[in-house]
Amino acid sequence: MPARLPASTDFPLNVHVTIVPPPPTSPRPTNVLLLLHGLGDTSDPFTNLGKQLNLPETVCISVQGLNPLPFDLGGFHWGDDITFDQPSGQMGFDAGFEKSVRIIGTDIIEQTLVNKCGYTGQAIMMIGFGQGGMAALAATLSTNEEFGGVISIGGPLPHSIASKHGINTPSLILGGSSNTMITRTALERLRSVFKSVEYSKWQRSGDGMPRNYDEMLPIMRFLARRLRSRQGVPDDSMEIG
């Protein structure tokens, strides 16, 4: 039977999600896109992103970071701890992802989306920004499941995560041409882990979110290739393979 639209009550009480259903004219959802915000943000901007994407047959689920920032700074993060880079003094991105990996990989994907709602691994995709992209990549490595795809904007594979090899989930990595977390070394490590790594380098400094059509185009093309459709397929049909 086809998968059903998730409800907020399907998810654990300690997980804050915002669900953006497919467009009203679209058939029931065939795909899930998990959206993971960056360090110090909330789920709200990525909820808006899910609405703007307006993807057919796709439910977008914006997940909020599991831990609030200290000192009443506002916003949330994905790390097991808070670390500070030297000598900049800024909060570090790679602060351990054991809890996030467990929540995303087991509680959200396996127990909720797969077991409760009926989605297959290949129907589930993730997109994350900065530390959220690192969490998405780490969650992909935490399971033997092949997902539909993972997109990381300015987030490398965390060093705190043990590397695997031959991961089948296709990946898209994006970042700036300078002052970027997506260094040559980071790309080499990703390519040693994932069988398929696409890389899009923006012609600007920094790893911010896409600012224009040209920067967004690689993401839309990746999604268009990876998202599935059941339009015209009977509800009682069975997927094979």
Image (cartoon, helix red, strand yellow):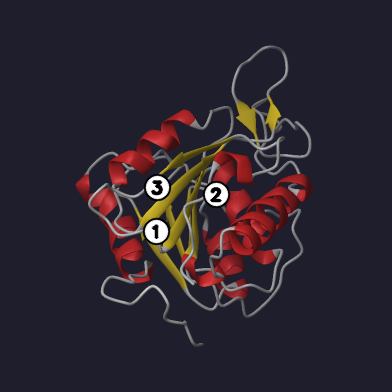
Characterize the local packing of mark 2: few (<14), some (14-19) or many (20 or more) Cα atoms within 10 angstroms. Answer: many
The percent position of residue 34, horizontal first and vertical second, equals: 50, 50
Q: Is mark 2 on a helix, strand or loop?
A: helix
Pick whichever, 116 or 131, lies toward us.
Answer: 116
Read off the residue under disc 3. 176
Q: What element carries label 1?
A: loop
Q: Name the front one of labels 2 and 1.
A: 1
The numbered mark at residue 110 is: none
Please indicate whether residue 138 sits to the left or right of residue 195 in the image: right
The picture quadrant where one finds residue 89 is: top right
Pick whichever, 57 or 106, lies toward us.
Answer: 57
Please indicate whether residue 172 sits to the left or right of residue 194 in the image: left
Q: What residue type is labelled 3?
A: Gly
Read off the residue under disc 1. 29
Residue at the spot x=34%, y=77% of the render? 234
Residue at the spot x=68%, y=23% of the render? 69
Tell me the distance, in whole angstroms, between the alpha carbons under discs 3 and 2.
15 Å
Q: What residue type is labelled 2?
A: Gly
The percent position of residue 180, horizontal first and vertical second, equals: 48, 45
The numbered mark at residue 133 is: 2
**Among numbered discs 1 and 3, the one appearing first in the sequence:** 1
Characterize the local packing of mark 1: few (<14), some (14-19) or many (20 or more) Cα atoms within 10 angstroms. Answer: many
**Among numbered discs 2 and 1, the one appearing first in the sequence:** 1
